[in-house]
Image (tube, rainbow, N blue to C red):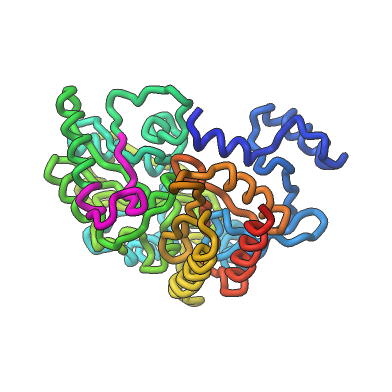
Amino acid sequence: MSDTKQILQLNRFDASSNELDERTRAMVQRRFTSFGQSSVLFYQQPLEILRAQGTYMYDRNGRAYLDVYNNVPCVGHCHPAVVEAIAEQAGKLATNSRYLYQNLNDYAEALLATYPSALSNLVLTCTGSEANDIALRIAAMHSGGTGIVVTQAAYHGNTSAVMAVSPSSYKKGTLLPAHVRTIRAPSAYDLPAGSDVGAVFAADLQAAIDDLAANGIGFAAVLVDTVFSSDGVFAAPAGFLKPALAVAHKNGGLFIADEVQPGFGRTGQGHWCFDLHGIVPDVVTMGKPMGNGYPMAGVVTRPELLDGFVRETGYFNTFGANPVAAAAGHAVLKVLEQEHLIANANAVGEYLRNGLRKLGDNDARIGDVRGAGLFIGVELSGADKAPDAALATWIINAMKDEGILIGAAGAYGNVLKIRPALCFNQENADQLIGTLQRLLQRI
């Protein structure tokens, strides 16, 4: 089991705990009976959540929890406009995608308008995993190769093909498949001062492609979550992905931007994290934030890439382009614009990062604060910048007890991962900063 997997396990329910109340213990037993003993529950003391609204979730006792963890409700939990759009369309028509729907055309045009003009074709799917699976298939068909390059702690989903390129999910000691190579995440924090992060990342990519070639494997694509979520969040410096894009094209492969987590304005600089770097990827994948939690996802690419893929495979998704999905997705885009949520992510994200850095000025355990907009990583370190995963684990569970839900990421599980809904405000930021400060003073 990888270090990250071990840390995640510590942040999950402990079946041997004797501190559960009778109702919780009974609910856990019913869940395990129906879904198996391996069914995952977050936290050593699991939560029973009854409802959610905006940036908060509420347990059975009505206690509010500030949700800093969940990347799915990008415009806020149960946003009324999205709920209304889903309910209204579900009451009219919910069927497969092989008929004509005006609302589907309207949604596709609105979504594609947020992309560079070269990326003008859309496939709607059910999950981000499926979207990344299709992206890999497109790359293999275009390039004629099978070799995929990802970062060392990447996570891209749970289909068989995508799990193979998700090293964070590997058990400790598991060998990479022959067609997969990993490279370092683009971390200025871990490189010597003054290093050109983009040049280092591009050089590592070229070395991985060369190694594939030396083993008779053609290069198909580099697949990156554009904020490097599982690797510990690395959105800056802006523009560092340009050299890697050039390397991918020089070697006959594609650049796939996984926007499942950072997309839809979370980084505060346009709808997509790749906007930060001034690049146009070949393929972009999206996930459940598309519908604010409604199960939908998608792939956006160039027409010639999509046409070749569909002609060869006959690909068809019964559910993905149904009219309810279109209603949910279009409602999300309208809310983003009408409530100026991307600008809010930029402003509040800067406020939050500055507050966390100020906290770190007086506490050496906060080693680095990075990210963009409302997607932020906080590196927790011990002596000599050594990753402190135990501190991250303690904080995650202590935060829950203080009414804040947060997660961790990074190769060592020591980076607090902050990715709240885009309606997160300065009052929420103050609550997070103040709570973290109090907890750090306790240990």
**Nearest the eye: 376 or 130:** 376
Question: Main structural element of the magenta stretch: helix, strand or loop?
Answer: loop
Please give left or right for residue 28 compared with residue 184 in the image: right
Picture quadrant of residue 140: top left
Residue 40 spot, x, y in % from top left: 64, 36
Residue 12 spot, x, y in % from top left: 65, 39
Residue 281 spot, x, y in % from top left: 25, 53
Toward the front, the furthest residue is 383
- Residue 258 appears in the picture as rendered: no
Please give left or right for residue 374 compared with residue 238 in the image: right
Above or below, 44 relative to 339 = above
**Nearest the eye: 41 or 317:** 41
Segment tinted magenta in the rendering:
182-200
- Residue 408 appears in the picture as rendered: yes
Toward the right, the furthest residue is 22
Number of numbered callouts drawn: 0
Residue at the spot x=27%, y=40% of the render? 138
Instruction: Verify whether residue 193 appears in magenta.
Output: yes
Residue at the spot x=18%, y=23% of the render? 215
Picture quadrant of residue 8: top right
Instruction: Verify whether residue 96 appears in magenta.
Output: no
Residue 261 spot, x, y in % from top left: 45, 52
Above or below, 257 relative to 345 = above
Please give left or right for residue 255 compared with residue 431 in the image: left
Residue at the spot x=44%, y=57% of the render? 368
Above or below, 374 relative to 386 = below
Toward the left, the furthest residue is 250
Residue at the spot x=42%, y=59% of the render? 370
